[in-house]
Image (cartoon, coloured by chain):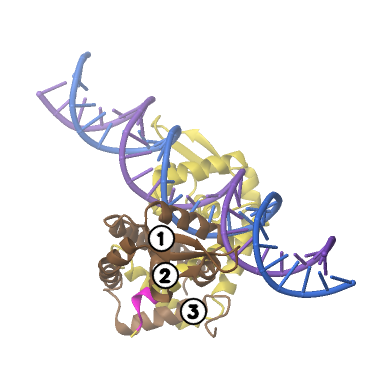
Chain colours: A yellow, B brown, C purple, D blue
DNA sequence: CCTTTTTATTTACCCAGGTAAATAATTGTA
DNA sequence: TACAATTATTTACCTGGGTAAATAAAAAGG
């Protein structure tokens, strides 16, 4: 029987470790992991409103406002007004688009390294377990 | 084949969810999850230096300084000088000791709820997988 | 014994998550 | 149409993670 305190302690430790490591890798490109998450999202879905972004990333609106403000300062994204004047549509800059593939490769490689001690089977188990930890329990 | 981007995205999402939920439960007791982690640690090992705490929790020294300062303000811990005058030994207050069991019960119940959709087998898999994500790969 | 190095803690300053409340624009409705 | 409710975003303020550099005390060496 595993002590749940130990389990959650380990979970937090590992996530801190993974995030720290991820940020260190990304620092070579002048990015942080949250900024990369937004960049990935925009490359995948095209220009999005901030609401679409925070709903997809499952964070609160102020978090996205802040991170996007920083990304705009560092010339990763631009914001234009949407059809609805309340909306701000976020879009990758040309510079971001140019750098995207290179960063993506580095991130992908790093992710592979991080899970390199897991078997294919374990990766699947991990994914399924994580789904079950969510509010929808993995059916959504 | 699972996309590693999706896997890490899910990992971060779930950890945010779990942490937020955890903090909400603890708010009834006037605590945050990091403060609870320190309280748990002190109950388990007795009075400790700050260095012993941050090494055990796997966070940096300034993080622990900050959190302990807050806990001291809220009468959860006291700091006395150690034999080595550089050290500050952290100890639970009487109030913290009195409240400990009650909070522990609530936390334990919440942790059980969080993993309620996992089988015993999956909890073990989860623990093993998390170990393999660390720098030591689970052998340490 | 004095100087250098190491160790424990703190300070200042980042990024990133959260909540509560304020704007501003749009929708819904009497 | 005027007013109320909703929606998108922002602001202010909290916790908590990190790094780099500053203290202060202890340990190590000449």
Disc 1 + disc 3, Cβ < 8 Å: no
Residue at screen point 40% across, 78% down: B126
Q: Which image quarter is the C terminus of chain A in?
A: bottom left
* Stretch in magenta: A2-6
Q: Earlier in the sequence, mark 3 or mark 2?
A: 2
Q: Is residue A114 visible?
A: yes
Q: Nearer the viewer, residue A105 or A29?
A: A29
- Output the chain of dot 3: B
Q: Residue at left 52%, top 53%?
A: A34
Q: Nearer the viewer, mark 3 or mark 2?
A: 2
Sooner in the amino-acid sequence: mark 1 or mark 2:
2
> Residue D27 appears in which quarter of the rendering?
bottom right
Dot 2: element: helix
The kind of secondary structure element at disc 3 is helix
The residue carrying mark 2 is B42
Residue denoted by label 1: B77
At x 65% / y 45%, what residue is drawn?
A95
Residue B13, visible in the rendered structure: no
Report how many numbered discs are placed on residues in the image.
3
Q: Position of residue D23 (x, y in %)?
A: 67, 51
Chain letter of the residue carrying label 1: B
Specify the label residue B100 is tagged with.
Answer: none
Mark 3 highlights which residue?
B131
From what the image shows, is residue B52 above or below residue A55?
below
């Amino acid at each position: 029987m595993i002590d749940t305190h130990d389990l959650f302690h380990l979970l937090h430790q590992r996530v801190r470790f993974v995030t720290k490591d991820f940020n260190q890798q990304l620092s070579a490109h002048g990015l942080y992991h949250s900024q990369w998450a937004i960049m990935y999202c925009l490359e995948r879905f095209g220009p999005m409103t901030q609401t679409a972004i925070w709903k997809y990333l499952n964070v609160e609106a102020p978090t996205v406002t802040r991170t996007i403000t920083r990304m705009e300062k560092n010339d990763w994204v631009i914001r234009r007004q949407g059809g609805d004047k309340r909306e701000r549509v976020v879009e990758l800059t040309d510079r971001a688009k140019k750098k995207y593939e290179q960063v993506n490769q580095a991130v992908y490689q790093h992710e592979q390294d991080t899970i390199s001690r897991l078997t294919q089977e374990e990766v699947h188990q991990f994914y399924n377990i994580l789904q079950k930890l969510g509010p929808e329990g993995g059916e959504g």
